[in-house]
């Protein structure tokens, strides 16, 4: 099997050269995680589709759909995952519950489609958190407002979300209609990997079927009395779309989005902010009301930098400190 169908070259070209030096030279040693289930992990390898026992593989590794992994393919042994390769991006959240553990949602993705239905579930604050999670991960978000066929005008919803979107594209679609494909076309390409996030009932599974050109995901109607959806998708999985539309990771609905503050990733994603901050007068400058702030000065002179700074401030405001080591 040609692993380029699953985005190998696209991913490899984005891995820093110092990380490439530590990767295997044989394609047979690579696999890509395409599904995470309760008892197994699905992956695509050069030999084709394979499965690995979830408990064995996940004992020391935290696996995400979209991961490229190294494999032990010795003929006299069961196929095993030995290492998770460098992630060019990781969309994650802090899982709800008393133990603040990191929950990977999707890795090595190019865009995240943030879906919101134009109904009573529409919530700007929640959408801003989804945006911050994408920005913190270095993933380009696209805001997708769904159920366009059920509203007279999308303008109030577009105006509301524009207050937090900054330069994020805002699309209004009917997820059932093929016109959604053309609207999303600029973000679909061979070997690209995209993912979706949003509440149950926002239309993720419906949009997946539309982009795939087939019924690959089961869908259910939302409840009429409150517009809330039922959990149709219960696992994360990668789907190969038709007609060079790339790969799409579908996932269960997400209501709560606590953003993990990963200092290393934040520093890489917002390196221009970090570099400018070295010239601030105060070493602990918060880039807020302090005088002689090099970051604010640069933001006033450079529109592109100013947008990056606004995203950085949103992430810093919403992100949670590093997770305790239990």
Image (spheres, rainbow, N blue to C red):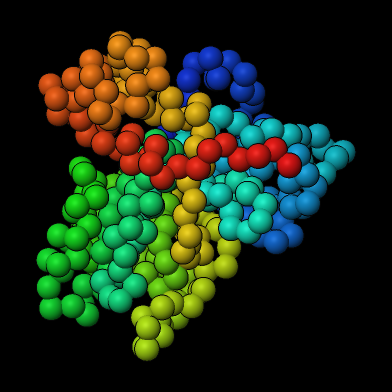
Q: Position of residue 310 (x, y in %)?
A: 26, 36
What's the residue at 43%, 77% (across, down)?
A: 229
Give the residue at the far right of this rendering.
Answer: 76
Q: Is residue 285 left or right of residue 7?
A: left
Q: Position of residue 241 (x, y in %)?
A: 41, 56
What's the residue at 13%, 78% (across, down)?
A: 152
Q: Quick check: 288 above or below 145?
A: above
Q: Is residue 30 left or right of residue 312?
A: right
Q: Position of residue 312 (x, y in %)?
A: 33, 34
| Residue 291: quarter of image | top left
Total marks placed:
0
**In the rendered view of the protein, which quadrant contains the N terminus?**
top right
**In the rendered view of the protein, which quadrant contains the C terminus?**
top right
Q: Quick check: 209 above or below 171?
A: below
Judging depth in this view, the residue of 200 and 96 nearest the camera is 96
Q: Is residue 240 left or right of residue 308?
A: right
What's the residue at 43%, 38% (across, down)?
A: 137
Give the residue at the far front of this rendering.
Answer: 290
Judging depth in this view, the residue of 285 and 265 nearest the camera is 285
Q: Is residue 19 visible?
A: yes
């Amino acid at each position: 099997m040609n692993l380029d169908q699953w985005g190998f070259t696209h991913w490899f070209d984005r891995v820093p050269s110092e990380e490439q030096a530590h990767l295997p030279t044989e394609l047979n040693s690579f696999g890509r995680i395409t599904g995470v289930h309760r008892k197994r992990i699905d992956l695509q390898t050069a030999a084709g589709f394979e499965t690995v026992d979830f408990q064995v593989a996940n004992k020391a590794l935290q696996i995400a759909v979209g991961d490229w992994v190294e494999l032990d393919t010795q003929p006299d042994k069961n196929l095993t995952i030995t290492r998770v390769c460098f992630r060019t991006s990781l969309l994650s959240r802090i899982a709800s519950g008393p133990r603040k553990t990191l929950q990977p949602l999707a890795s090595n993705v190019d865009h995240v489609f943030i879906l919101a239905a134009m109904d009573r579930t529409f919530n700007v604050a929640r959408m801003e958190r989804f945006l911050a999670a994408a920005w913190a991960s270095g993933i380009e978000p696209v805001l997708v407002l769904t159920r366009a066929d059920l509203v007279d005008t999308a303008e109030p919803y577009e105006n509301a979300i524009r207050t937090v979107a900054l330069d994020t594209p805002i699309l209004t679609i009917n997820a059932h209609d093929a016109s959604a494909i053309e609207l999303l076309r600029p973000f679909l390409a061979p070997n690209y990997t995209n993912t979706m996030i949003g509440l149950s009932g926002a239309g993720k599974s419906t949009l997946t079927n539309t982009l795939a050109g087939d019924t690959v995901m089961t869908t259910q109607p939302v409840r009429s009395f409150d517009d809330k959806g039922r959990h149709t998708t219960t696992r994360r999985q990668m789907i190969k779309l038709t007609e060079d539309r790339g790969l799409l990771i579908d996932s269960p609905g997400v209501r709560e989005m606590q953003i993990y503050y990963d200092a290393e990733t934040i520093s890489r994603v917002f390196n221009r902010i970090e570099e400018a901050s070295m010239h601030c007068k105060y070493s602990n400058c918060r880039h807020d009301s302090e005088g002689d702030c090099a970051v604010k000065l640069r933001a006033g002179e450079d529109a592109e930098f100013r947008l990056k700074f606004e995203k950085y401030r949103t992430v810093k405001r919403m992100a949670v400190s590093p997770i305790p080591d239990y």
